[in-house]
């Protein structure tokens, strides 16, 4: 059996708590110079062995997104100006929109695919996705790919 590396994108709510605690410990270590690994793991409530076991295998999606292209898919209502609001929301966070594809609306809902280049100056990817998803008339946003 080969040892191929595979990556998956899953929602935060589906992860076991230990993975989220490892991510939190890593954030603490990055943000506080004087903090030791022992102090960080105690603060988040995991063992050092759990931290070392998972530290190189779990990271927030946005941490490794700079310089990458992300493609998102969503459904939007057929309302004048909604596509412009979606694009403006993305552009307001300084992400470079590369491609846009919108299907012809069926039953007043269109499928939309947007490819975005994440620049060093781009805001938080999670915030962008949450902001787009919060727009009235946007349904079912998904990250389709990351290159």
Image (tube, rainbow, N blue to C red):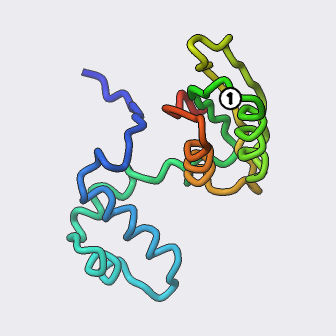
Q: Quadrant of residue 72?
A: top right
Q: Which residue is more in the foreground, 25 or 38? A: 25
Residue 11 visible, this angle: yes
Q: Residue furthest bottom?
A: 34
Task: Tell me what residue is drawn at x 36 percent, y 27 percent.
Answer: 4
Q: How many marks?
A: 1
Give the image location of residue 83, x and y in percent: 73, 32
Q: Is residue 11 above or below residue 69?
A: below
Residue denoted by label 1: 114
Task: Tell me what residue is drawn at x 31 percent, y 64 percent.
Answer: 21
> Could you tell me which quadrant the N terminus lies in?
top left
> Could you tell me which quadrant the C terminus lies in?
top right
Q: Which residue is more in the foreground, 43 or 12? A: 12
Residue 142 visible, this angle: no
Name the side, left or right, on which 98 lies relative to 39: right
Q: Is residue 29 above or below residue 123?
A: below
Task: Tell me what residue is drawn at x 77 percent, y 52 percent.
Answer: 92
| SS at mark 1 in the image | strand
Give the image location of residue 65, x and y in percent: 61, 46
Give the image location of residue 8, x and y in percent: 40, 34
Name the side, left or right, on which 2 lies relative to 33: left
Task: Tell me what residue is drawn at x 78 percent, y 36 percent.
Answer: 84
Q: Quadrant of residue 46?
A: bottom left
């Amino acid at each position: 059996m080969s040892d191929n590396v595979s990556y998956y994108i899953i929602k935060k709510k589906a992860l076991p708590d230990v993975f989220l605690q490892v991510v939190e410990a890593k954030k603490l270590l990055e943000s506080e110079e004087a903090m030791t690994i022992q102090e960080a793991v105690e603060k988040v409530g995991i063992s050092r062995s759990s931290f070392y076991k998972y530290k190189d295998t779990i990271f927030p999606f946005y941490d490794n997104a700079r310089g990458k292209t992300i493609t998102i898919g969503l459904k939007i209502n057929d309302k004048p100006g909604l596509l412009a609001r979606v694009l403006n929301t993305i552009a307001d966070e300084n992400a470079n929109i590369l491609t846009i594809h919108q299907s012809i609306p069926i039953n007043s809902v269109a499928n939309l695919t947007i490819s975005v280049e994440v620049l060093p100056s781009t805001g938080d990817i999670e915030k962008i996705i949450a902001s787009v998803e919060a727009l009235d008339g946007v349904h079912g946003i998904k990250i389709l790919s990351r290159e």
